[in-house]
Image (cartoon, grey):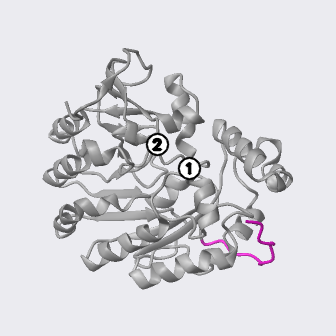
Amino acid sequence: MRWDEQRVENDMRLPGVGDGTVVRTFDAPEAMGVNFHEVRARSALNHVPGGRYGFNWTVNSFRGCSHACVYCFARRTHTFLDLDAGRDFEREIVVKVNVPELLRAELARPSWKRELVALGTNTDPYQWVESRYRFMPEILAALEEAETPVSVLTKSPLLLRDIEIYERMAKHLPISVNLSVPTLDEDAWRATEPHTPSPAARLDAVAELRRRGIDSGVLIAPLMPGINDEPEQVQPIVDRAKEAGATFLGGVALHLRDEVRDVFFAWLEAKRPDLLPRYEQLYANGRAYMRPDDRKQAARALRGWGRSNRRSRSQTPTPEEALATAGGGGSPAATGPAGQERLF
């Protein structure tokens, strides 16, 4: 067993996870009341249909995320487990204990074509519990041995624990390790991402990755009108990313789909009722994405910085942009007039 001194609470079955068998369920006092459900998954590599995301394969060791970001597009996937997209997504974390072993076996198949694998698509691979399970070193080792390109997106500088692995991989494989930094504004950060590591530390991690010769960039997403999209909020991130030598810098406007919309609007009602009328207009009639002009307004502070420094300004999204939008909405390069009053 990977975790010592755990407390078994019950035995339950979660639909939609492998064979549905929970190995054990427990909480950990140091984890802020989060419950962990260890399961044995049937597969590690998940095929993404359609190819519209910039990658065809993902690996997710966890379902749910203790970072508790109010806007997270992955919240809706918790309903597939008969859990809710609100508190359950943050407090009932599914841990796929056999993912490293499964991945190694799947990558060894003759049919594997060494396509890009994205980590951080449905949950943060470096959320708090990874410090205990240590899946990522095993996952990265398996991908390296299979000569498979990798893209990682996270909000945690915990990735620096594995920096020597990334440094070694970068010498012979296409690899990018990217940090999501929606804001440096402390009020906005603590309100919208209550359990994430310091945004400044994330930017420090980008600088260290680049110092080691590893492609690393910054995703400023989501951009939320009246919360983190003011130029004076975005510009410090741009400046820090430039200082760090980031090889990617992008930003995407907030999108709200299905249960995520409900969670975000409930948060607005509780924490920012002054913004409710504005968001009701922006996402009127059940819209998941802002209208193009509104997206341009949200992304106005990123004029000229919405694409990778290493490639042409095509309209094909990077994997990091696709992750933030779940495959649609908003051009990160969009621009528009300034003029919104700062409300946070």
Q: For the residues marked 1 and 2, what is the alpha-carbon distance in whole angstroms?
A: 8 Å
> Which of the two residues, 158 or 321, is positioned nearer the viewer here?
158
Residue 6 in the figure: left or right of residue 53: left
Q: Residue at x 53, y 76 (%)?
A: 237
Q: Residue at x 17, y 47 (%)?
A: 142
Return the x and y of residue 274 as percentages of the image width and height: 83, 56
> Which of the two residues, 153 or 2, is positioned nearer the viewer here?
2
Main SS type for the magenta part? loop
> Picture quarter containing residue 16?
top left
Residue 300 in the figure: left or right of residue 203: right
Which residue carries the number 2 mark? 65
Q: Quadrant of the N terminus?
A: top left
Visible residue check, residue 222: no
Image disc number at residue 317 = none
Return the x and y of residue 311 as percentages of the image width and height: 43, 76
Q: Residue at x 31, y 32 (%)?
A: 96
Q: Residue at x 39, y 49 (%)?
A: 127
Image vertical order of residue 53 relative to residue 97, above or below: below
Residue type indicated by callout 2: Cys
Question: SS for tag 1?
Answer: loop
Question: SS for tag 2?
Answer: loop
Image disc number at residue 69 = 1
- Circles 1 and 2 in contact, beta carbons < 8 Å: yes
Q: Counting other residues with Cα less than 10 Å from the Cα at mark 2, is it few (<14), some (14-19), or many (20 or more)?
A: many
Visible residue check, residue 196: yes
Residue 291 painted magenta: no
Q: Quadrant of the C terminus?
A: bottom right
The span picked out in magenta is: 333-344
